[in-house]
Amino acid sequence: MEHLKIYQQWLTNPALGEKSRTELLSIADNDTEIAERFHKDLEFGTGGLRGIIGIGTNRMNIYTVRRASQGLADYIIAVAPNEKERGVAVSHDNRHFSKEFALEVALIMAQNGIKAYLFEDLRPTPQLSFAIRELGCIAGAMVTASHNPPDYNGYKAYWQDGGQLVFPQDEEVIEYVNAINDPASLRVMDKEAAIQAGLLEYLGKDMDDKFLAAVGALSLNPEIIAKMAADFKIVYTPLHGTGKMPVQRALQNAGFKNVYIEPSQAEPDPNFTTVKSPNPEDPTAFEYALKLAKEKNADIIIANDPDADRVGCMVKNANDEYELISGNATGVILAEYLLSQMSKKGILPQNAGIISTIVSTRLTQKIADHYGVSYAETFTGFKHIAKQILTWEQASSVKFIFGFEESFGYLTGDNARDKDAIGAALLLCEAAAFYKVQGKTLFDALEDIHIRQGYHAEYTRSITLPGIEGAAKIKQIIADLRNNPPKALAGTEIIEIRDYIANAPSYDMLYYILSDQSWFCVRPSGTEPKVKIYLGANDTTAEAAQNRLNTISAAVFDFMKI
């Protein structure tokens, strides 16, 4: 079997470290584990390289990190040989081995004569993207597995605009990565030698200050914050990740006085001890912050994922109970707040534009149309939003204002080209304070949007199918839908099917539109062993929209036999 052959090649490789060899010897009698570790190489998906930590080609370790970094270095040398001195920015989150992996990235770059700017300690993903743009780097790398479980880590690769690599660059880099057959033989430059040679420079407080100044400039109503500072209460949790310092400073710099950080989740913890999943999309992740919010009678609860590119918020609903606002609802609330306030102040550019993704709410385009701004849709994955921003920028056609995807990722302005949960946290708190002056909550603001534009309801379901068998099952689910699509669901005709597999780039996603304008979309995750199903419906009342969504959801899941 091929996986056993590759396993033996690794085990007998004289360049492999003894600790790594010992780990491989410990699974010598476990064919299932060997197959899981060696049946394929880790691949770049919608969010980069991501996998379980361990030794093997399908695992995150110093060898796969070196291989990916060497491939990126080879690409830089091939396409921009005279721009190596611009350097590569590198950051990392709080996960197991993140700091070690980030140093490996930096020292591979140094070994290739490419300067590395390495953050002195953990920093969030948006700050890495900001640093690439601020320093004028040719590329960047972020070591993180986002909101995955504790046994995962990952690697996001960026280009000079601050956005993640997209087609065709991602495939070109992968060609260079795949050309490296023996990652254990790759050598890194000695750290002290790299520093002495000027090929390794650490980033610290100065870059923090610049990033936070840029975040602070996003504020549209500082006078509202000043007015409400004494009465407005914020509970914040970084969920053991990178967000504490930047979010705390951003809120304090803006003038918020009552910012309470959940103490049990304030410090970095690679095991994410207090949560089942460090994901602000999951209401259970708010358990500890919710207790603190009730104690303080907070106006808003904010949570970040470990690399602080996602943000979730809870506010009180009509029943005076804290409720998580969905990713779609948060996106339209922020879009409405930004566009309405910029329009009111006369600072909304005539060529303004906002961006969302194909699987996000249809309500976003209606908001764009209401304010007369351009609207674009992209594939899932924030790198596609970044690519659209760059396309507008290069054509000097549209001025980007705001972009979001339903999975709790938001970006405002030009600070970064990836999800920025620091800026979004500030704007959510400012918007909540703004509406509180009017006697409203963010849910009330959302209701105002629905009254004007119609009620929209969305639902996302993820089915996790790990391992080799899971991967095969996911492929079968997609193949069945592609080859035998439904013609109608719950008595409602399907009037359009969009199959994005033939696109350039090819994207394994199926999108269905029904005659009542409800819709659903199915795709395999690019970074996790999941198949994801997105559904949406709209109607003239909240109840009718939800009922329509429930009906189509039940029919879809019945058809898919899940």
Image (tube, rainbow, N blue to C red):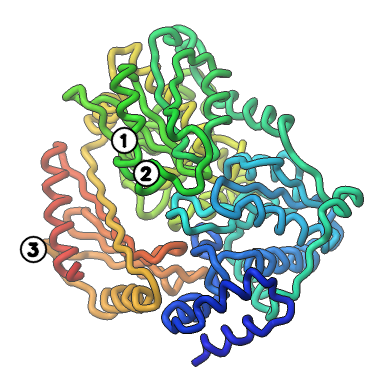
Q: Element at badge 2? A: loop
Q: Measured from the top left, where is residue 220 in percent x and y?
A: 51, 21
Element marked by disc 1:
helix
Kindly indicate whether the residue at mark 1 contacts the one at mark 2 (C-beta within 8 angstroms): yes
Classify residue 253 as left or right of residue 519. right
Query: Considering the numbered disc 3 on the image, is that residue within a helix, a strand or a loop?
Result: loop
The residue under the point 9% across, 62% down is: 490
Q: Find the distance from the CA under tag 3 to the CA under tag 2.
A: 42 Å
The disc label shown at residue 298, or none: none
Alpha carbon separation for disc pair 2 and 1: 8 Å
Q: Is residue 117 visible?
A: yes
Residue 275 numbered mark, or none: 2
Three-letter residue code for mark 3: Gly
Question: Which numbered disc, 2 or 1, marks the residue that appears first in the sequence?
Answer: 2
Residue highlighted by disc 1: 287
**Where 264 falls versus 375 (above or below)?**
above
Question: Which residue is at a point 36% across and 36% down the rendered structure image?
Answer: 330
Closer to the chain start, of discs 1 and 3, is: 1
Q: Is residue 358 above or below residue 304?
A: below
Determine crowd level at label 2: few under 14, some 14-19, many 20+ residues with C-alpha closer than 10 A: some
Q: Which amino acid type is marked by label 2?
A: Val
Identify the residue at image location x=38%, y=9%: 231
Badge 1: few (under 14), some or many (20 or more) residues near its Cα, within 10 Å? few
Q: Which quadrant of the figure has residue 20? A: bottom right
Q: Which residue is identified by label 3?
A: 491
Q: As shown in the figure, which amino acid type bears the numbered disc 1?
A: Glu
Which quadrant is home to the C terminus?
A: bottom left
Q: Nearer the viewer, residue 313 or 368?
A: 313
Q: Is residue 365 visible?
A: no
Marks 1 and 3, how far apart at CA:
41 Å
Q: Nearer the viewer, residue 226 or 379?
A: 226
